[in-house]
């Protein structure tokens, strides 16, 4: 969904009168600067985006497909979202590595495989509405927005909410609603949700989130104390007033704070 900026393309192609004068001068001097300029420009801009796209493709094959994620929509979404734009500038070279990274405020962006696997377990379709608890840097939010019709995402730390909001607006996602709020209570006004994903560990199942699932909806959530070495990742599926639970695997997440922590 990110689009290129047409204004930027125009500046690059329209050299104007001064440009034509300078080009004429070089023509008289029998030296064509265009290949040199093009080479330096692409080193500064195009090339590095190509390098990141290549790293992204490698990340999909080596870290995600090789570990069993198969959902085409998830793989395509992660091939599209520029993960390097979401990490702090000091970590840009590590953006596509096989692990989590710090995003400031004591929080982390999850390992790419975990993002892919949790998203796959939501079983989203293009008409799904999703609730995410823990926007963080907004990377998981963007991956969800590539697949689903609408993504609602709540973040308890104001600074992270503001930064993610600016970034996702800049990338022109129009199907994301962000809110600075305590997500342990969900957002009942916009419920029900076909999928709910929690990217911080909860001490127990948050009842308000179960209540906000649609019939057949799926909640993917890590449960356990953040003092423990690992927590359990669960997918909880609603069937009318019943809920079935499937344990997926062990994970390590930052704690869910707010009301649930009191
Ligand atoms: N999905 C994020 C992961 C961020 S880490 C990403 O891709 O970057 C978990 C996030 O959950 C943190 O930003 C933390 O501030 C947030 N969080 C913790 N408890 C929360 C709560 N009760 N409500 C909303 N967000 C919460």
Image (cartoon, rainbow, N blue to C red):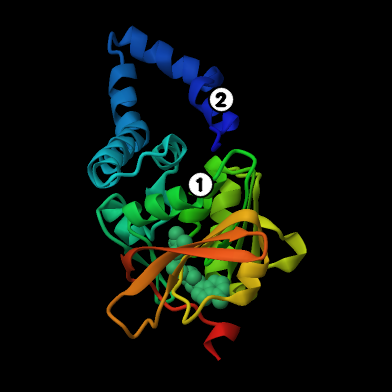
Q: Position of residue 39 (x, y in %)?
A: 29, 26
Looking at the image, tell me whether mark 1 or mark 2 is earlier in sequence order: 2
Q: Quadrant of residue 193?
A: bottom right
Q: Is residue 120 above or below residue 87?
A: above
Split into 4 quadrants, where in the image is the N terminus? top right
Q: Is residue 12 left or right of residue 128?
A: left
> Does residue 205 appear anywhere in the picture?
yes
Residue placed under numbered mark 2 in the picture: 10
Say if 171 sits above or below 138 in the image: above
Q: Position of residue 2 (x, y in %)?
A: 54, 38
Name the residue furthest bottom: 262
**Can residue 186 be seen from the camera position used here?**
no
> Which residue is found at the position 34% from the left and 44% from the top?
69
Q: Is residue 147 left or right of residue 104?
A: right
Q: Foreground: 254 or 244?
A: 244
User: Which residue lies under the disc numbered 1?
Assistant: 123
In screen coordinates, is 233 left or right of 193?
Answer: left
Q: Is residue 31 above or below residue 152?
A: above
Q: Residue at x 27, y 59 (%)?
A: 99
Instruction: Please give the name of the residue rendered at 52% of the width and 87% of the height, measured from the top-left corner.
Output: 261
- Tell me the mark number nearer the camera, choosing from 1 and 2: 1
Residue at coordinates 25% horizontally, 53% vertically from top-left?
Answer: 97
């Amino acid at each position: 969904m990110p689009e290129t900026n047409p204004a930027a393309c125009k500046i690059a192609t329209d050299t104007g009168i001064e440009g034509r004068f300078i080009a004429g001068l070089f023509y008289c001097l029998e030296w064509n600067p265009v290949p040199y300029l093009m080479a330096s420009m692409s080193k500064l801009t195009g090339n590095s985006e190509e390098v990141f796209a290549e790293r992204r493709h490698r990340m999909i094959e080596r870290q995600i497909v090789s570990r069993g994620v198969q959902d085409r929509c998830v793989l395509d979404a992660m091939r599209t979202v520029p993960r390097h734009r979401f990490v702090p500038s000091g970590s840009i070279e590590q953006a596509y590595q096989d692990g989590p990274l710090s995003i400031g405020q004591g929080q982390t962006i999850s390992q790419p495989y975990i993002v892919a696997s949790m998203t796959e377990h939501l079983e989203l379709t293009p008409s799904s509405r999703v609730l995410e608890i823990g926007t963080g840097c907004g990377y998981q939010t963007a991956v969800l927005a590539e697949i689903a019709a609408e993504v609602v995402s709540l973040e308890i730390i104001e600074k992270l909410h503001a930064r993610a909001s600016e970034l996702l607006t800049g990338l022109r996602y129009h199907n994301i609603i962000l809110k600075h709020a305590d997500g342990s209570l969900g957002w009942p006004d916009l419920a029900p949700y076909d999928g709910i994903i929690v990217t911080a560990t909860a001490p127990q199942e948050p009842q308000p989130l179960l209540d906000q699932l649609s019939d057949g909806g799926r909640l993917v959530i890590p449960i356990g104390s953040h003092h423990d070495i690992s927590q359990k990742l669960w997918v909880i599926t609603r069937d009318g007033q019943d809920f079935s639970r499937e344990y997926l695997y062990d994970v390590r997440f930052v704690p869910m704070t707010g009301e649930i922590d009191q």
